[in-house]
Image (cartoon, rainbow, N blue to C red):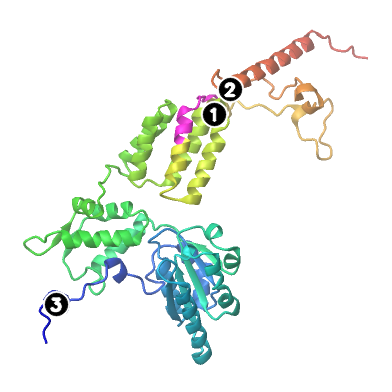
């Protein structure tokens, strides 16, 4: 009997299966197809050696989304001829996990087959749930691979971490992502090669930069651009910068990382910090971040600024800039923008002095132009036999005197290169140096007035 109220399925849905997203279809099937992570998968690297030798222990893969954690787990399973059990810390229950472990134990006992148990989003498991895995890791009934976007040392139990080798995956570089897109455009079986697509390099670069190292985001944006762009009269789909911008919903910033825009923008950032304008400095910093500038380059420039332009006016500027540089290396994007902004605002609002920079430039100029001086006799090394020479003055140890200072010559001509400013903390340095120089000049004057001893 026909159900008159049953909604008929559209013919297209019955006859045509919806394909998986491009990122899923292009998932690498071997280490040779895998892009990025050369620091752990390059020739001779530990993880690659372990996979190729089939001697892999339990591992934790830690890194941002789209860097290939799940893909790498599947490749390892295939390379080691093991069964693959996938478990999600978000979707599956502990009961599901226990069943997977039971199947692995039976598979090992009955057929001698190894099982790779892949637990995605493992940081979503609580302590007791993580403890369920420990017996299997102890007896080796499974080859465990956990994946997380969080630092495992902070979010997983010490028992689980101590039984696993931790490998950190880095965001893919723009060049990696461009290569992945080009491979997808050429692959007729899994990718978009069955379509006639003319993609501009600028469009691929934009998608790569705006994907922030995420291969999944990049490939799916490329597919969206291809499927939503009408073909021309010859049936070719043209993907230019405008189509790329629409597909990823971010406009391209006019910025050439290797040309004038790069140098002009970093110059604007440096001069804004030097000029004490935090708002302008933050704008130029943001422009470079959005354009995909290398965050390590930005951190290096801020470290240089801390010494060159803030200098002794605020001695805390350099350690703060170095701390920001270390934080950038540690956390990566997108969070790295916070310590970069912190350091930028601090340096822009700090008192400024370039006197230390000017001093080393002046000293270098003297040396390079040949105005060199001999090391005073009292300062020469005396730690080897026959080092002392007749008539050589004794070096006076400053710490033996009040204030850890005693007037003595460290440069024969008494040249001066460093002239402290009145800005910030450097004012106190100026006062201290003026006092010491006054003591030195008084001692020199007294020595000149004292007649030499009579010869006998």
Tell me where the magenta segment starts and ends, as one range.
344-355
Please give the residue where the numbered disc 1 appears in the rendered image.
311
Kindly identify which numbered label has been placed on residue 6. 3
Q: CA distance from mark 1 to mark 3?
A: 78 Å
In the rendered view, tell whether residue 272 sits above or below residue 333. Answer: above
Name the front one of labels 3 and 2.
3
State if disc 1 and disc 2 touch (CB < 8 Å): yes
In the rendered view, tell whether residue 170 sits above or below residue 255. Answer: below
Name the front one of labels 1 and 3.
3
In the rendered view, tell whether residue 290 sits above or below residue 75. Answer: above
- Percent across and percent down for residue 44 are 52, 69
Position of the N terminus by quadrant: bottom left
The 10 Å Cα crowd at callout 3, few under 14, some 14 to 19, many 20 or more, is few
> Which residue, as the protein is rendered here, is positioned at the far left?
233
Please give the residue where the numbered disc 2 appears in the rendered image.
426
Identified at 48% across, 66% down, the residue is: 122
Left or right: 64 with respect to 192? Answer: right
> Which residue, as the protein is rendered here, is positioned at the far right?
456
| Disc 1, SS | helix
Q: CA distance from mark 2 to mark 1?
A: 9 Å
Q: CA distance from mark 3 to mark 2?
A: 84 Å
């Amino acid at each position: 009997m026909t159900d008159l109220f049953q909604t008929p399925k559209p013919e297209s849905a019955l006859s045509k299966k919806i394909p998986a997203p491009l990122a899923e279809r292009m998932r690498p099937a071997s280490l040779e197809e895998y892009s990025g992570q050369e620091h752990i998968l390059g020739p001779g690297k530990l993880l690659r050696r372990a996979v190729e030798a089939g001697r892999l222990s339990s591992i934790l893969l830690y890194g941002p989304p789209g860097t290939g954690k799940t893909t790498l787990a599947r490749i390892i399973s295939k390379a080691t001829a093991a069964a693959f059990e996938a478990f999600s810390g978000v979707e599956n229950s502990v009961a599901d996990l226990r069943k997977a472990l039971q199947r692995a134990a039976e598979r090992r006992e009955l057929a001698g087959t190894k099982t790779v148990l892949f637990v995605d989003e493992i940081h979503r498991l609580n302590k007791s749930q993580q403890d369920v895995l420990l017996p299997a890791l102890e007896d080796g009934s499974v080859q465990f691979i956990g994946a997380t976007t969080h630092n495992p040392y902070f979010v997983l139990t010490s028992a689980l971490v101590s039984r696993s080798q931790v490998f950190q995956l880095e965001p893919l570089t723009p060049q990696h992502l461009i290569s992945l897109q080009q491979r997808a455009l050429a692959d007729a079986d899994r990718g978009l090669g069955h379509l006639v697509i003319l993609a501009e390099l600028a469009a691929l670069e934009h998608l790569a930069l705006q994907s922030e190292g995420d291969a999944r985001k990049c490939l799916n944006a490329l597919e969206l651009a291809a499927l939503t762009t009408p073909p021309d009269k010859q049936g070719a789909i043209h993907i230019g910068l405008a189509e790329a911008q629409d597909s990823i919903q971010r406009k391209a910033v006019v910025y050439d990382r290797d040309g004038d825009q790069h140098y002009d923008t970093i110059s604007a950032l440096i001069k804004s910090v030097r000029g004490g304008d935090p708002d302008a400095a933050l704008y130029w910093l943001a422009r470079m971040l959005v354009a995909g500038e290398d965050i390590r380059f930005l951190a290096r420039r801020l470290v240089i600024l801390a010494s060159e332009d803030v200098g002794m006016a605020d001695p805390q500027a350099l350690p703060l800039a170095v701390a920001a540089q270390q934080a950038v290396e540690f956390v990566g994007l997108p969070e790295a923008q916070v310590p970069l902004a912190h350091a930028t605002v601090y340096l822009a609002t700090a008192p400024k002095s370039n006197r230390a920079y000017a001093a080393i430039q002046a000293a270098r100029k003297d040396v390079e132009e040949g105005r060199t001086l001999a090391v005073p006799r009292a300062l020469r090394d005396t730690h080897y036999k026959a080092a002392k020479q007749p008539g050589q003055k004794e070096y006076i140890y400053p710490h033996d005197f009040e204030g850890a200072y005693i007037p003595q010559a460290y440069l024969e001509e008494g040249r001066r290169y460093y002239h402290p400013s009145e800005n910030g903390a450097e004012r106190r340095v100026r006062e201290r140096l003026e006092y010491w120089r006054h003591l030195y000049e008084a001692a020199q004057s007294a020595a000149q007035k004292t007649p030499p001893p009579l010869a006998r």
